[in-house]
Amino acid sequence: MKKQNLVITGGGSTYTIGMIMSLIEEKAQFPLKSITFYDTDGARQEQIAKACNVILREKYPELESFSWTTDKQEAYENADFVFVQIRTGGLAMREQDEKIPLQYGCVGQETCGPGGMAYGFRSIGDMIDVVNDIRHYAPDAWILNYTNPAAIVAEALRREFPDDHKILNICDMPAAIMVSYAKILGKEIWDLVPEYFGLNHFGWFTDIYDKEGNRLTDQIKRTITEDGFIPEDSEIVNDPSWIKTFKQVETMLNHFPEYLPNTYLQYYLYPSDMVEKEDISNTRARQVINGRQKRVHTMSDQIIADDSTENVELEVDIHGRYMIRVAASLAYNLGETYIVIVENNGIISNLQDDAMVEVPAALTSRGPKPFAVGEIQTFYKGMIEGQLAFEKLVVDAWFEQSYDKLMQALTLNRTIVDAPVAKKILDDLIEANKDYWPALYTEKKKKAQR
Ligand code: NAD
Ligand code: G6P
Ligand code: MN
């Protein structure tokens, strides 16, 4: 088995230590020669990297090299795989994305509705730069992106790099949900075979099978409606916000019993409940700053001070394991099936070809080979087409610097609907993001300038 050279872009992320633990857990599946961290914030990355250095020395002695850098060439030369996990504007800007819509009574969420639009508008430019940098030094490397909002980033990268077939966008949410299904069934997640369709953070499991072909969907539905649904993955199991979110799946399944929903549909199906549940002075970004980020940084300091991991509790999570299993299937042509984000091209036969959809695909060294979904029913088609139009308009707006298209996008979104509200939120977001967004022009202004 060829050993891989892996680069993690966004080495300073709160997910990096979990990823390193997952790489250690999965070393037989995805053996590594080297790991390199790249980040634009050298200090943030160094703290995490120094802790990872201790972890890797203890638990991955066969790794030939581990290093961290802010130099692109040093990072990307010789890379076989690059995992991209950046956050333009950091958690501070995430907090703005959440608070501003809430001030107008609309959902404030980092990947859904106006918050997702704002985050997408910050991410697109940086993600295009990251891909160009990687391609300059490593034209053949696989790029696994999970930078959010993945739906909008995937659409922007599809347009900017239409001929690059080694970029794959991935989300861990279907897998995190499947960890809870597996628990219900008394099985391992890797024993389950999902049937799923939708957009990123906007999809449904139509069925769950085991590897022997037994259909387990009804057992899962029955258990969820009778006994409830809770997160089981280590990263989210004790998190009150995720516990609430998984509980909402029970409600969704009562109102819409046909398929098993992605948790993110709660923001589109119950926007008023979601707004009501929020505390504007303690939105999710604040919880992450005081929760995961603090926990990760305290843990890093402890590991560095002790020069050992003996006094910390290190855990493997599905986020890291999932990305790594995806990478292994691509690297070693395993043809295993995972839910990933790909261009539709007829997979959902009654949806436009150029949509980026989230569906199961067999992952080979020639890329993802998605399975046909066929025709979807009116409710799902209507929901998806509205959301897809929003995502397309956001990306149009970015490339065209169009104020009007953002106005259209926000008004279309199920979390807003009301045009005057869309305008107020948009104007506030423009002000809050002036250091990050491209300038926007109305069509009227564009015409006057011509
Ligand atoms: P974070 O802010 O802790 O980490 C991001 C890191 O990226 C920081 O160290 C930052 O300095 C660095 N960075 C920012 N811009 C950069 C650039 N242009 N080039 C290189 N590095 C850059 O954020 P986090 O909460 O750990 O999340 C990281 C990313 O992973 C986010 O985009 C988040 O939404 C995403 N994520 C996605 C999924 C998924 O399912 N798709 C799951 C988990 C996390
Ligand atoms: C899930 C989603 C990710 C998202 C994350 C947010 O894993 O799939 O796309 O980034 O949740 O979690 P947080 O704890 O930062 O709110
Ligand atoms: Mn996701």
Image (cartoon, helix red, strand yellow):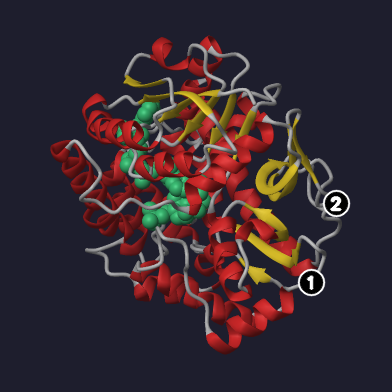
Task: Classify residue 337 as left or right of residue 288.
Answer: right
Position of 22 relative to 110 (above/below):
above
Looking at the image, the residue that sits furthest to the bottom is: 226
Position of 166 relative to 372 (above/below):
above
Q: Residue 52's quadrant in the figure? A: top left
Q: Residue 379's quadrant in the figure? A: bottom right
Q: Where is residue 411 in the image (x, y as percent from the top left)?
A: 53, 56
Nearest the camera: 389 or 65?
65
Position of 231 relative to 176 (above/below):
below
The residue that mark 2 highlights is 349
Residue appearing at x 31%, y 63% in the figure = 103
Q: Position of residue 172 (x, y in %)?
A: 54, 51
- Decide if residue 435 is in sight here: no
The residue that mark 1 highlights is 215
Position of 374 relative to 436 (above/below):
below
Q: Position of residue 190 (x, y in %)?
A: 64, 56
Residue appearing at x 24%, y 51% in the figure = 312
Q: Where is residue 222 in the image (x, y as percent from the top left)?
A: 66, 84
Nearest the camera: 89 or 450?
89
Residue appearing at x 60%, y 69% in the figure = 181
Helix, strand or loop at label 1? It is: loop
Check disc 1 and give the amino acid type.
Arg
Residue appearing at x 70%, y 72% in the figure = 259
How far apart are the two marked residues, 1 and 2, measured between alpha carbons? 24 Å
Q: Quadrant of ligand 2?
A: bottom left
Please report whichever mark, 1 or 2, sits nearer to the chain's N-terminal start.
Answer: 1
Mark 2 is surrounded, within 10 Å at the Cα level, by few (under 14), some (14 to 19) or many (20 or more) other residues, namely some
Q: Please tell me the numbered disc located at residue 162.
A: none
Check disc 2 and give the amino acid type.
Ser
Name the image quarter holding the N terminus: top right
Is the residue indicated by label 1 positioned so its CB lies within 8 Å of ligand 2? no
